[in-house]
Image: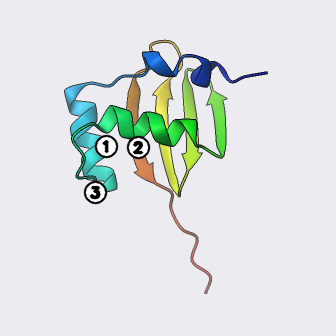
Amino acid sequence: MENELLSNINLIHTTEMGIDRIKKNLGLDTQDVVLWCKEKIADSTEIIRKGKNYYVYTDNIIITVNAHSFTIITAHKEKQIKNN
């Protein structure tokens, strides 16, 4: 069964504030943040729905997408666990 987020990948979008937040959090220098995120979502290793959001895990980043509007809320690097 295909994931609902992947089935609706063409509906994924974000706001201007979302673009700025994603660029800042990931250190991106791309003109099309939404396309970049869509490609990451399509190649993701894991997509989990928790409540109203999808959490997409790929390449040590997490992309958060609203499950109803398909708006990318944020993206950030996964925290690395340090072994002491």
The quadrant the N terminus occupies is top right
Q: Residue at x 26, y 41 (%)?
A: 21
Q: Quadrant of the C terminus?
A: bottom right
Q: Position of residue 35 (x, y in %)?
A: 36, 34
Q: Element type at marker 2?
A: strand
- The residue where tag 1 is placed is 22
Q: Residues within 10 Å of mark 1 (few under 14, many from 20)?
A: many
Q: Residue at x 66, y 34 (%)?
A: 48
Residue bearing mark 2: 75
Examine the image and state in which quarter residue 77 appears.
bottom left
Q: Residue furthest top?
A: 68
Q: Which amino acid type corresponds to the residue marked 1 in the rendered image?
A: Ile
Q: Amino acid at mark 3?
A: Gly
Q: Is residue 30 above or below residue 35?
A: below
Q: Amino acid at mark 2?
A: Ala
Q: Secondary structure at mark 1?
A: helix
The mark nearer the N terminus, 1 or 3, is 1
Q: Position of residue 65 (x, y in %)?
A: 47, 28
Q: How is the image coloured?
A: rainbow
Left or right side of 25 for 67: right
Query: Could you classify mark 2 by the number of other residues whose Cα lies within 10 Å: few (under 14), some (14-19), or many (20 or more)?
Result: many
Going from the N terminus, do you reach mark 2 or mark 3 first?
3
The numbered dot on residue 27 is: 3
Left/right of residue 49 with respect to residue 32 in the rendered view: right
Q: Residue at x 22, y 52 (%)?
A: 29
